[in-house]
Image: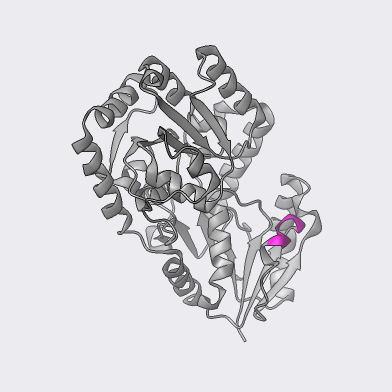
Amino acid sequence: MTKLAIDLTYQPMGGALAQINEIIKNIDSYDFDNVVFYLSNDNLHFFDDTNDTKIILHPVPFSNKSIIFRTIWAQLILPVSLIVNHVDVLFCPGNISPLLNLRKKVQWIGTVGPFEKNFIPLFGLKTKIILILTKYLMIFSSLTSDIVIFESNYTRELFVRKYKQKIEKSAVLHIGNDDYFQPVDTNYSETAKKYSEREYILTVSHLYPYKNIEILIDSYYHSQLHKRELYVLIAGSTTDKSYFDKLNSQVRKYGLEDYIIFLGRVGKQDLRELYSQCKIFVFTSPFENFAYTLVEAMSCSAPIIATNTTAMPETCGDAALYYSSDSEQELQNCMLTFLENENIRKQYKERSLNKSSEYEIYSVINQKTNQILEKLV
């Protein structure tokens, strides 16, 4: 009897949240007799609608108390538990795995922020310490993993070049292609109906300081796009309240309260319709391992403007206009290119859809993940 263990004691958000949901949804893709999920109490809700008998839940109540508790558990207690529970392979999709381990292990790297020099300075002291700790745990635990899965070639090349990751012990799996996202010309959702009569720029992002949404607000104001009756919709949960307050203050300073609208967290149906109907989709984040949001937007044939940093050019290829992440003028020029030339905008809508078709859907990604795990048994 073969047994796979998955460490789910971290708090998945964004692309990581979609990944976990899809792993559970596609659990039968994993050719193991049992799959043990070590998880915090906060993550028990993922299994509310799951009755698969191959799944075994192993709650770790104290793992969500602090990063210190989680680190102690992952580095000291988890390796022992794997032996006691006769686990064959450990899969760690949350960036970090045990440094010392007597079982085969696969580590998934889902973030690149802590490795970028301008990322950590954006945060307060406590968060800086956590990010630095996370960075070095990621590096050292990846070096003791049997396989490390990266979401982009950009991040794998970074680890190979700077942190001595062996390329033969790595793989790249691009995630984010959810077959739910496709172009639609209807507005069934409440949010999409509300804005169906308006032209708008859309951005989709959790509100973190590094997302750099303020450059979109500055560019929008200085381009006087509100005078064209063009709106900005910002969809995403308020993860950092101080950053949300900063953005609101910026909007008030420019007198744009009627034109820049924070939608908060919106559901998949809202997103699909908003992506499909937007005049422009702008992606302002400079730091992404692989931007699943861009894959969603491309799948809905949105005309995209993105930063030219980290993995964005790899994600979109020729299906986006790019700007330097700190250049307000370049962003203005990109927006005006789409707004003043409908043929170019339509061309990039077609490119988006074509590029999205290159990415495999989550069920296939889970099958490929299983193949990697199964080879270690």
* x and y percentages locating residue 352 in the rendered image: 29, 48
Residue drawn at 30 percent across, 34 percent down:
322
Comparing 323 with 305, the one in front is 305
| Residue 319 lies in quadrant | top left
Q: Is residue 304 left or right of residue 337?
A: right
Query: Can you say which quadrant of the picture contains the N terminus?
Result: bottom right
**Residue 144 at least partly seen:** no
Q: How many labels does the image show?
A: 0
Identify the magenta region. 41-45
112 to 183, vertically: above or below: above
* x and y percentages locating residue 54 in the rendered image: 64, 80
Residue drawn at 50 percent across, 53 percent down:
269
Q: In this view, does 350 lie to the left or right of 121?
A: left
Residue drawn at 42 percent across, 33 percent down:
198
Comparing 50 with 10, the one in front is 50
Q: Is the magenta stretch mostly helix, strand or loop?
A: helix
